[in-house]
Image (tube, grey):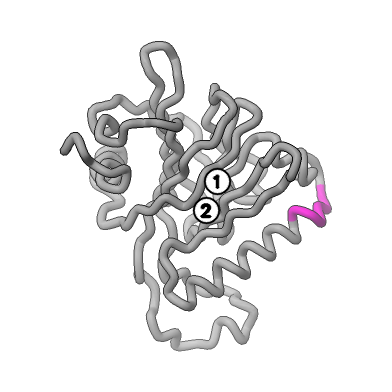
Amino acid sequence: MSENATPAQALADVVPKLLLGGPTGLTYHQVGEVVVVSDMVRCTGPHCPEWVSADRLPPGRYPVWAGYRVDCGPLDYPYDYAHDGGEDEPWRSPVAAIALLAPGTDPSALPSLSFDRFPDVTYFGPEVAFVWDDSAGGLLASGGPGPHPELNALTERTTRALRDADRAGVVPNVVVAELSPVTGVNVIALPVDEPAGEMYDCYGEDDEFICAIWTVG
């Protein structure tokens, strides 16, 4: 790996090794920065009751990268999914890997680092993954039993925007929405086509956070 490797090049090298051969052939893009005000970031579906978080994060803005499987779905839909409300519509370019980097991380160092696999499965979907600070659930009252009208509205709005962009062939396809003008807490929404995945993380010698990678599927 070159000393001048970009995060996209480093992640393309790291992710297949974590999964012992897949996913490969992903196109990586930085899709935004998630604002951290607690010490934890979730990557999960908006209504999932269980997830695996990256923790022990100092407050700040953390770059988020996503690996897309570009044009893996039908280019010419045999059925007008949009007319039918999008039910069962396949994503043309879903996300298969999501990476959270500590600010200032040298991407060329990632392939030489040791990642730990979290033993529990993390859950996404059914159509989108949200990357957001742990406090965001409280802002939308998503932690307890429903209904959750604000969360439902956010999910519907972001899913619709992602669907429109996906049908148009837009990559990277992402929606970033601010949830609190006071703290700046936001959500990064991404298209996914699998309900579960795994999480790998890496910390330094002084237990400082370096990187977390969620794989989809």
Amino acid type at image mark 1: Tyr
Within 10 Å of disc 1 (Cα), the crowding (few <14, some 14-19, many 20+) is many
Give the quarter of the figure containing the N terminus.
Answer: top left
Residue in view at x 59 percent, y 27 percent: 59
Residue 20 shows in this picture: no
Q: Is residue 65 magenta?
A: no
**53, above or below 96, in the image:** above
Return the x and y of residue 80 as percentages of the image width and height: 54, 87
Q: Is residue 148 magenta?
A: yes
Kindly identify which residue carries mark 1.
Answer: 123
Return the x and y of residue 118 as percentages of the image width and height: 45, 30
Q: Earlier in the sequence, mark 1 or mark 2?
A: 1
- Rendered image quadrant of residue 102: top left
Chain part drawn in magenta? 146-151
**81, above or below 150, in the image:** below
Within 10 Å of disc 2 (Cα), the crowding (few <14, some 14-19, many 20+) is some
Return the x and y of residue 175 as percentages of the image width and height: 57, 59
Residue contact between numbered discs 1 and 2, judged by CB atoms under 8 Å: yes
Residue 182 shows in this picture: yes
Residue in view at x 19 percent, y 34 percent: 3
Amino acid type at image mark 2: Pro
Residues 145 and 33: in front is 33
- Rendered image quadrant of residue 215: top left
Give the SS element for disc 2: loop
Q: Specify whether 90 is left or right of 70.
A: right
Residue in view at x 71 percent, y 48 percent: 179
Kindly identify which residue carries mark 2.
Answer: 195
Q: Specify whether 95 is left or right of 144.
A: left
Return the x and y of residue 79 as percentages of the image width and height: 50, 87
Residues 181 and 188: in front is 181
